[in-house]
Amino acid sequence: YLFRPEVAIRSRLGDPTGAALSYYLKSKPSGPVTLSVAGADGRTGVLFSSTGKEKLKTEPGMHRVNWNLRYPVPPDIHGGSAYDERSPRGIMALPGKYTVKLTVDGKAYTQALTVVNDPRSKVSQADLVAEYKLATTLMNAVARDHQTADQILQLRAELKELRTRLTGDANAQAILTAMSDLDHKSSVIENVLYQSHAKTNEELLNFPTELNSKIAYLEDEVDFGDGAPTTQFEEMARHYLGELDQQIGLWKKLQQNELAELNREMERQHIPVVYVAPTP
């Protein structure tokens, strides 16, 4: 059973904020238990699961979890990456109507959730929406950056494994040269998308900040307090998004040209081609 949650107050003034979500299990379920929150636009605000990182309890009885009114952050780059200043916290949800859904053994239970803005806040709904839209655009850009970086990392790992296998093969010298060239060009794009040499925030002191960290920091600044985005924030967003589009365009061109030509030559020599998984 899913209990109807109390009205949740969205606050940025240092007060505890969040929605308490309570459910009751009569018996231990045979499969996973999930608890999700979706807005009127259908966007899922959070997904708790008995098999996820923040595991829902599945023992019989009453249980409660808290949604901090923030949307999930994009998955990190495979192998990890570091951010300047602070890591993304997730965009704060807008005031409005939400649907909470509990799923147990394939059966769904729903309740309505209302989120209201802090009554002490004088910011208009229109300004909150403008802030939310820009923050969402920037967080989506972080996700695109990470997805592209993951593709490049996958390609470079495959190239490394193939070079090890083909080294010493006199018939594969042209292929080995093409692989080295493709690996180098991919690494150039990779090192613009994120700082691959730094795995912790402390290590970033020794290396320049790259694109994912810049976008993530700007998103956090946009969403740090309530109010319409400033002109400077909007200009910085356009600049970073343009730079990201440029790098993704270079990566797509690299796949369409150099990678495609490499695979054609490998097919001619009956060598398994290199496959790059598409972005989700």
Image (cartoon, rainbow, N blue to C red):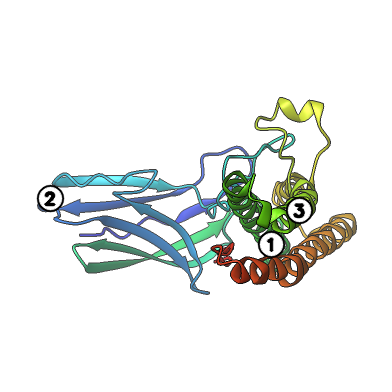
Cα–Cα span, label 3 and label 1: 53 Å
> 62 or 273, which is in the foreground?
273
Secondary structure under the numbered disc 1 in the rendered image: helix
Callout 3: helix, strand or loop?
Answer: helix
At horizontal 65% and vertical 50% (from top left) the residue drawn is 156
Q: Position of residue 91 (x, y in %)?
A: 61, 54
* Image disc number at residue 200: none
Ranked by sequence position, the earlier of labels 2 and 3 is: 2
To which quarter of the image does residue 175 belong?
Answer: bottom right
Question: Where is residue 96 drawn, in percent x and y?
Answer: 53, 66
Label 2 sits on what residue type?
Lys
User: Mark 1: which amino acid?
Assistant: Leu
Q: Secondary structure at mark 2?
A: loop
- Which of the 4 image quarters holds residue 239? bottom right
Instruction: Report the residue marked by disc 1.
Output: 128
- Measured in 3D between alpha carbons, the distance from the residue under mark 2 to the one under mark 1, in whole angstroms, is 42 Å
Are circles 3 and 1 on residues that touch, CB within 8 Å?
no
Judging by the rendered image, the residue that carries numbered circle 3 is 177
- Could you say where residue 116 lies in the image, as x and y percent from the top left? 53, 59
Badge 2 is on which residue?
A: 28
User: How many numbered circles are shown?
Assistant: 3
